Image: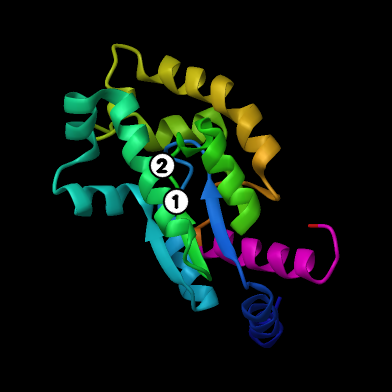
Amino acid sequence: MDETAFKRVVSGVIIAVMENIYLIGLPGSGKTTVGRSLARLLCLDFVDMDQMIEQRTGVSISHIFEIEGEAGFRKRETRLFEEVSNRTRIVISTGGGIILDDSNRQLMSRRGQVVYLKASMDILWSRLKNCQNRPLLQTSNPRARIAGLMKEREPLYDAQADLIVEVTSETANRTARKIAQLIRSRAAGGQP
């Protein structure tokens, strides 16, 4: 697609996006990187839920997990998600586990379009194998943990998604452009 045609697509998406865009997916799927690119492309605000939690608490997600456990973190995440979801016309990079809470799934359904960044095990592993700041992966076998998260969460992601975008080795900008085109197509009444 040439640049002029793409600018028409982006213009159509900006007009069509009157609600939020929620990016969901496993850790390492690219929600933050793609989200920033998508927000920039569509001239929307961007919110990264994990970064916002760290800014508000003044500590890392890992520290919250250490002190409060996953249950404590999920409560914080849900409270903040309710607040953030009251805003409009933003791209939200959710935490990978946001999907586990039914009230979060309901909020997404009511207040926006949900885009699932679906990544293969190989892509996730290549991105996360050396990661030290993901509390759920601090185990003796992080690859098995990723596989477990995938098995637990994939059905929820699939069921929640308005759009499913396969994550490949493409750049975040290319993936963001693909999402913009799919949103425009969906807004125009076409199927993605």
Q: Report the quarter where the N terminus lies.
A: bottom right
Residue furthest out toward the bottom: 4
Q: Are marks 1 and 2 in contact (CB under 8 Å)?
A: yes
The residue drawn where x is 65% and y is 28% is 155
In magenta stretch: residue 134: no
The quarter of the picture where residue 129 lies is top left
Residue wearing tag 2: 78
The residue drawn where x is 36% and y is 19% is 142
The residue drawn where x is 42% and y is 18% is 145
The residue drawn where x is 30% and y is 33% is 73
The numbered dot on residue 82 is 1
User: In the figure, 153 relative to 76: above or below?
Assistant: above
Residue furthest out toward the right: 190
User: In the figure, 75 relative to 4: above or below?
Assistant: above
Which residue type does callout 1 highlight? Glu
Residue furthest out toward the left: 58
The quarter of the picture where residue 45 lies is bottom left
Magenta stretch, residue numbers: 173-191
The numbered dot on residue 61 is none
Circle 1 residues within 10 Å: few <14, some 14–19, many ≥20: some
Q: Position of residue 71 (x, y in %)?
A: 34, 25
Number of dots carrying numbers: 2
Q: Report the quarter where the C terminus lies.
A: bottom right
Which residue type does callout 2 highlight? Thr
In the image, is 46 to the left or to the right of 64? Answer: right
The quarter of the picture where residue 47 lies is bottom left
